[in-house]
Image: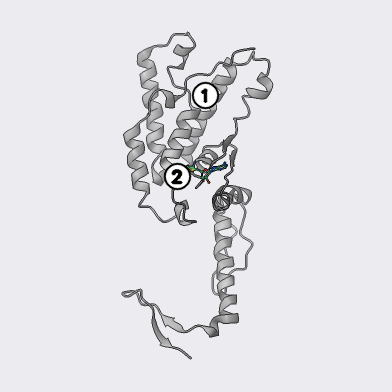
Amino acid sequence: MTEIKAPKKLIEVALPLDDINIAAAREKSIRHGHPSTLHLWWARRPLAAARAVIFAQMVNDPGYERSLQRGVNKKDAGKERERLFEIIRQLVLWENTNNETVLNEAREEIWKSWRETCTLNKNHPRAAELFNPEKLPAFHDPFAGGGSLPLEAQRLGLESYASDLNPVAVLINKAMIEIPSKFAGRKPVGPIPKGVRQTRMTEDWSGAKGLAEDVRRYGHWMREEAQKRIGHLYPKVEITTGDLRPRVFSCE
Ligand SMILES: C[S@@+](CC[C@H](N)C(=O)[O-])C[C@H]1O[C@@H](n2cnc3c(N)ncnc32)[C@H](O)[C@@H]1O
């Protein structure tokens, strides 16, 4: 049996833990745009930590050649490791979650490490199947729970699969990973609410923006329909800015 040459991964050697911890703790107070607002999940993993560990599992440690008896300059390996840490420090920031420049830098590192691994294993009898330098290995979390890991694997450019015993977890993962990727970059198709300006042809519908707009449009449509059909069964209320408790002013 031909031995597989598996370079040591960055996560096996070192991680900028303080930076990851700070970003993960900070993320807890972020509500707007965070998947935690999609549906309650009691053991949600921070996206920052998930992103950092997947990156560090995919990237070869700069001193990896040591484990393959090729010899490496320790000082250069340390410098290179620090460069990778800096990528992680940027990667874990909530503000950079959709920053394509930062994400692309991380994705390129993952590709670089994968190609290195493929080169090391090019003489393996199953190299064409297992070590294709044009195809990254896919990611599967069989106990995906709240889906932080498959979501971040997808963000880092991996084909991502999630499964779980719990149907709530499956629903969260479908809504977060499967459906948005199917509609990525598509324009919204829902009915534009009355009184709202028509969207311009040049509108940016990258990522899940079109899908999000459709959720808003159909949500608005459903609310209007509900109002038309059963609205008369409910009392009218006035919501004031100072006091969020509704005041009933008509009960007809
Ligand atoms: C610790 S949580 C998942 C953590 C997850 N990786 C995350 O980052 O949020 C464990 C999950 O495993 C699921 N689970 C437990 N036993 C399972 C089984 N036999 N098959 C599939 N999923 C299972 C549970 O429903 C739960 O969502």
Residue that badge 1 annotates: 113
Residue 60 located left or right of residue 128: left
Residue that badge 2 annotates: 97
Tell me: residue 36, above or below residue 128.
below
Q: Amino acid at mark 1?
A: Ser
Q: CA distance from mark 1 to mark 2?
A: 22 Å
Answer whether residue 203 is visible to the viewer in this image. no
Q: Residue 121 placed where, x, y %?
A: 60, 16
Image quadrant where residue 77 sits: top left
Residue 100 located left or right of residue 126: left
Image quadrant where residue 243 sits: bottom left
Residue at 50 percent across and 28 percent down: it is: 58
Disc 1: residue Cβ within 8 A of ligand 1's nearest atom: no
Which secondary structure lies at badge 1?
helix
Number of on-image labels: 2
**Position of the N terminus by quadrant:** top right
Q: Amino acid at mark 2?
A: Thr
Q: Residue 148 placed where, x, y %?
A: 48, 44
Circle 2 Cα neighbour tier, 10 Å, few/some/many (<14 / 14–19 / ≥20): some
Tell me: residue 172, above or below residue 63.
below
Which secondary structure lies at badge 2?
loop
Residue 135 located left or right of residue 80: right
Answer whether residue 152 is visible to the viewer in this image. yes
Nearer-N-terminus badge (1/2): 2
Circles 1 and 2 in contact, beta carbons < 8 Å = no
